[in-house]
Image (spheres, rainbow, N blue to C red):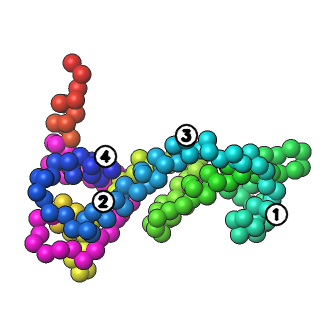
Amino acid sequence: MHHEELIYSLEQLDPDTPLTVSHIIAVLKCLEPVINKAKQDDPEQSAAKSDDDDLLNTNQLSEMLNVPVETLKYWRKISRGPLMTKTGKSVRYRLGDVRDYIKKHTVANTAQGRTLNLKEKKKALGIKSFALTADFDVCPVMLYGEQEVDFFESLEREEDPTGYRIYYSDTPFPLSDETKLKLQDVLKSHRIH
């Protein structure tokens, strides 16, 4: 489900619906990429960085990122890695661009890392991709031992879950007929006449 659908579904819950810590953590993990993106886009945070225009050479960046110089050269050829500034044969990297690159590649788990790598491969091949900020679907499931149970179905169970999993996808998960009807009702009620 899209993160907005998750929020909508949570808003529709009865206020007395019991939530376990696992349920709350699962919801927060689903929304974490959206929250992180909002923090990155905060103009006050970016204005506070006075050294963003400082320049690094390839050797300095190699040390900072702990990657070989040859890797940085290869990344430049395939339009990967931090943005660079080139004057003649001299290549430099703005510290602000390096920070942005690091933030963009910071993920909460390996699933997000795989999704991010897929996004970069698609971009390099010229395939339109999705942003890890809003245009992705999440599917939170609660664990009962090894059994996976839909997040909202788990709220009806008597026993507490033993954990959770979050599945991310750049293609929409199929919506149930019930959810489609609910979303149609919401859209109808918000139409401007």
Tell me which numbered mark, 1 or 4, is placed earlier along the sequence.
4
The amino acid pointed to by label 3 is Pro
> Observer-nearest residue: 122 or 188?
188
Q: Which residue is mark 4?
A: 4
Return the x and y of residue 128 as percentages of the image width and height.
Answer: 52, 45
Circle 4 SS class = helix
User: Which quarter of the figure has residue 146?
Assistant: bottom left
Number of the label disc, if any, that sits on residue 72: none
Kindly report the distance in space between the C-alpha atoms of the residues bearing marks 3 and 4.
24 Å
Tell me which numbered mark, 1 or 2, is placed earlier along the sequence.
2
Residue located at (16% from left, 43% from top)? 182
Q: Which residue is mark 3?
A: 43
**Residue 29 drawn above or below residue 133:** below
Kindly report the distance in space between the C-alpha atoms of the residues bearing marks 2 and 4.
12 Å
Return the x and y of residue 76 as percentages of the image width and height.
Answer: 74, 54
Mark 3 or 2: the one toward you: 3
Q: Residues within 10 Å of mark 3 (few under 14, many from 20)?
A: few
User: Which quarter of the figure has residue 193?
Assistant: top left
The region drawn magenta spans: 155-182
In the drawing, does residue 83 fall left or right of residue 20?
Answer: right
